[in-house]
Image (tube, grey):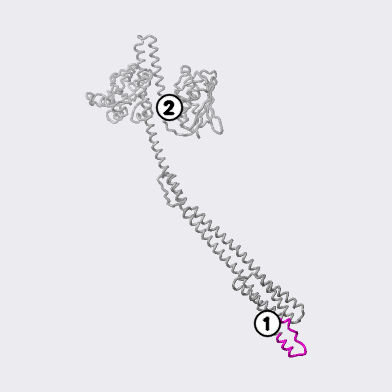
Amino acid sequence: MKISTKGRLATTTALATIGLIAGMIWWANLEVEDASARRRQTIELTRGLTELRLVTFEYMLRRDERPRAQEREVSDRLARLIEAMPFSGAGQSEVVAHLREHSVAAHRLFEELAATPVAEGPNAADAESTRRFEAQLSSRLLILQQEGLADAFRLTDFSTERINAAQQRVVIVILAGLALIALTTVGAAWLIDRSVLAPIGKLEQATREVAAGNWNYKLAIASSDEIGDMSRNFDAMTQSLRMSFAQIERSNQELAALNQEIEAFSYSVSHDLRGPLRSMDGFSLALLEDYGDKLDDEAKDYLRRIRAASQRMGRLIDELLGLSRVTRAELTLKPVDLSEVAREIADSLAQQQPARAVRWDIEEGLTVHADKALIQIAMQNLLENAWKFTSKTDKPLIRVGAVDRDGKKECFVADNGVGFDMAYADRLFGAFQRLHHESEFPGTGIGLAIVQRIFRRHAGKIWVQAKPGLGATFFFQLKG
Amino acid sequence: MTEAGKAILLVEDNADDVALTLRAFKRSHVMNTIAVARDGIEALDYLFGRDAHADRAGAPLPTLIILDLKLPKLDGLGVLKAIRADERTRLLPVVILTSSKEEQDLISGYSLGANSYVRKPVDFAEFVEAVKVLGVYWLMMNQSPPGAAP
């Protein structure tokens, strides 16, 4: 059974019990009210009967008209009360019938007594018999009236008994209901402990195992409730994780194999492609040196061109290898003082070409979280570019700094050199892409491809803003 | 400039590179005898006087070995390992002269006991300069270990 079904069942039981108790209290209230009304009626009846007795005694003493009239009035009232008595049930209706009979008989006796002449006069014997008859009547009347009172008291007892019984029944129902509610509560607590808390403990243990890398851990809770469903889903999840993990591992192995292939390829490129170039250059030079006197200027020029082309291709191969090395290098991320890196490169550039008067403006305290060797290569390329493209500028200025954009730090390398048309900006970072003729500004066109790859490897990015004749600014952002 | 008696063993499979290296030696006035081995096995045969070089058994060892890394049969690092493993050649100066500038090759070369690692430049003028410096250093300035050569 589902836990939710069990929960609903417990709630329904508790609610039904509470409803039963409430109904019982309501019923008892009605019962007590009804019984009280009857008791009031019987009390009134008792009062009437007592009054009737008083009136009877008074009439017997005085024998005048007023008590007689009163007796009639009270008898009528009693008759009406008895007729209105709503009593039902074996004992009660018998008592009521008895009472009715008695009061009718009592009334008749009273009339008889009233009709009897007063016992006085000359005939003493007559008077004596009359008196005896009168006494007999009175006694019978008083007995009847006394029995009526006893009946009235019995009716009062009936009502009192009813009230007591109703109250007793309410107490029993409330006790039984409370016991049922307590039982339901204990059952629910036991159920929660057995079907919810214990499996959650197991689940918690399982999540800890899986988090620690134990992909083979199985929860295996067999119950058919929600926890069982969850356990099955959990096991399915770890299984699919296990499969994904195996898949990733396979892909990683494939990648490693691929990487090894690339490395072997780079090695061949580095070794085998440079050999023929060396021969071309070496033998051209040999020709120039050993047979120079037999060659005219045009032939010498051709040989020089062959040498220049070989050397250029040598540089291209080296830079391609540099690009591949940047891709393959393992990253060691540490805080790097970018200002210091920039200053060192600036110093070495100034040393290589002391004739050039370039103004450097390098912001202090620039720190990035990066691989130092790679960031040095990137900065070397960016600053060399800035140095190169300001070679025809009047007052060359190269700036290195950082700006804050939307709470993120962006570093930049800016120059006031030749710049370029932003229409070509997309091509700028591709390998072997050049925006200027090599005769104007020498280079292989691979530097910015290396720079971009370095920032990509850091999950960062680089972009450029430039205007022809006004210079270029390279912005870059590193994660963290 | 240098004594002809001190021999150099050049281990190089590429004929162009052999010609260019010999030319570079000539141009930098290195006059030593230069023996050429075209693969790794031949280099070891030459050094230890075996097989094709059986006639060299007991002959003096070269003063300097110039070793390419990429060689047929047995590569340069294998040759270097064999040289360092043999008591007779253990102390011979070995200079690696190769096109590769892979970091891994540099590390392996030095850890196997290479004395120098020189990369062949494409520009022949630079190449001549490198060979010249090599010759001056290893054949003239450097004191060979005792017993290496006469």
- The residue carrying mark 1 is A140
A419 and A192: which is toward the camera: A192
Q: Amino acid at mark 1?
A: Arg
**Whole-percent x and y of residue A478?**
50, 32
* Residue A77 shown in magenta: no
Residue lying at 50% horizontally and 24% vertically, measured from the top left = A425
Q: Amino acid at mark 2?
A: Leu
- Foreground mark, 1 or 2? 1
A423 and A274: which is toward the camera: A423
Look at the picture and state if A330 lies above or below A307: below
Secondary element type, mark 1? helix
Examine the image and state in which quarter residue A251 appears: top left
Judged left or right of residue A73, residue A286 is left
Q: Numbered disc 2: what chain?
A: A
Look at the picture and state if A23 lies above or below A109: above
Look at the picture and state if A364 lies above or below A220: above
Judged left or right of residue A247, residue A81 is right
- The residue carrying mark 2 is A323
- Name which of mark 1 and mark 2 comes first in the sequence: 1
Q: Does residue A184 appear in the picture of this structure? A: yes
Mark 1, other Cα within 10 Å: few <14 / some 14–19 / many ≥20: some
Q: Does residue B132 appear in the picture of this structure? A: no
Residue lying at 77% horizontally and 80% vertically, measured from the top left = A64
Tell me which secondary structure the magenta stretch mostly adopts: helix
A159 and A205: which is toward the camera: A159
